[in-house]
Image: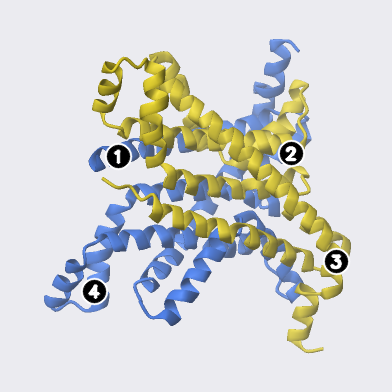
Amino acid sequence: MSGWDRFLDSFLNARVAWEYLPKIVEGFGVTVQLALCIILTGLAAGLGLAVLRALGLRPLNWLIVFTVDLFRALPPLVIIALLYFGLPAAGLSLSGFAAAWLALSLVLMAFAEEIFWAGITATPRGQWEAARSTGLSFAQTLGWVILPQAVRMVIPPLTNRTIAITKGTALASVVAVPEILGAAQAGVSFSFNPTPLTLGAVAYVVLFVPVVILGRWIETRFAWKR
Amino acid sequence: MSLDDFLLAFFSLDILREAWPILWQGLRMTLLLSLLVVPLGLVGGVVLALLSTVRHPWVAWPLMAWVDLFRALPPLVLLVFLYAGLPFAGLEVSAVGAVAIGFFLNTGAYYGEVLRAGIESVPRGQMEAARSTGLTRGQAMAFVILPQAVRNVLPDLISNTLEVVKLTSIASVVALPELLFQARQAQSVTYNATPIMAAAVIYFLLLWPVVRLLSRLENRQLVARG
């Protein structure tokens, strides 16, 4: 067997690929599910914090800024480890899925809050004053005048951040979540063949290359225009 | 659970004293690892950014595919593929080797995109003026274009570097004894969550100043744009 044949037999072994393809497809589903959960809760929490910050209450704002700094500074894997391996010491056990979901949501929340807040502060003051002078309340002004403009402005950086953090779903394999990487690693250790890893890498490329290209398109489509 | 139990489980000074030598080794390894992978990624990024100035389709298309591929693959997937997969191809790589190759490919692609944006932000006239004074293309790039490009995207470069340092925590998955790995070791010996909590605190203290700096730079950028 030549070197090339041996390489193909290891990394693109048809028999192994066929055997483990269903597991990888299942993992694909788990990855998508986890990613959607994170995007939903992370963005909602980030927007919520930015709105709270717009109230302008000093002590509350310090707390928000500290929380954001905290989850920007901590590596996501450390947060996952703390939640999954640490919390049981407090009598609270999270599943791997829940730990990864919570950890990555907190990280996305922190980055999203910064970005939403940047959009809110970038909206000209005159918009506030004009809206309030027409008789809109603070909440109405924020919800119907400021946020629509602010969110539109920050869509490109928000998309890029969300994509970057969503790729962190692979970290969930460390806490035994059978997402793509977890399923692939299990496949390798059962088959003594790295083909499942090749499949896993392909699955990620299939999942994320369109997302990366979409991100690039959004960046040009919603480019900061002044 | 009482407050005392909680403090004993997460903030025990006795445990911290016991685990400190292990954590200290981990911290040193994390710093060393950062000193290895940040320059590696920067070198890869500069090469990719310089290649992106070549307009020939035989360079531009493979380059875009390369960058998109390594931006789409989660770094942990790349790392596991290199560490667990390459031995099957007859290439035995150490954990440090796998981390170095993986970070070179992944963070190189990110630094490359940032630097490319920086080079594009420098007006064309700069290159023409520099060339007309008798500088070669290489000299003009190195002494005129790149310094301005780096200054223009400095916040993005720092932000990317922060992410790279945080990302070194995934080296724990291939048993490289950096901070998170050592904290997990200490935890499994002491049956106590204090070491992981300590690792999180160390990461936070180490990286908080960088997050603060970035926050200010980003605000200034927004103000400058507005």
The answer to whether tags 4 and 1 share a subunit is yes
What residue did someone put label 1 on?
B222
Kindly report the distance in space between the C-alpha atoms of the residues bearing marks 1 and 2.
37 Å
| Amino acid type of the residue tagged 2 in the rendering | Phe
Quarter of the picture holding the C terminus of chain A: top left
Kindly report the distance in space between the C-alpha atoms of the residues bearing marks 3 and 4.
52 Å
What residue did someone put label 3 on?
A192
> Chain A in the picture: what colour?
yellow
Residue B15 on image: x %, y %: 69, 26
What residue did someone put label 2 on?
A97
Q: In the drawing, does residue B127 fall left or right of residue B204?
A: left
> Chain B in the picture: what colour?
blue
| Amino acid type of the residue tagged 4 in the rendering | Gln
Report the residue at 78% width, 57% height from top.
A25
Residue B39 on image: x %, y %: 45, 59
| Amino acid type of the residue tagged 1 in the rendering | Leu
Residue B9 on image: x %, y %: 72, 22
All told, the count of numbered labels is: 4
Kindly report the distance in space between the C-alpha atoms of the residues bearing marks 3 and 2.
27 Å
**Helix, strand, or loop for circle 3?**
loop
Q: Quadrant of residue B19?
A: top right
Q: Residues within 10 Å of mark 4 (few under 14, many from 20)?
A: few
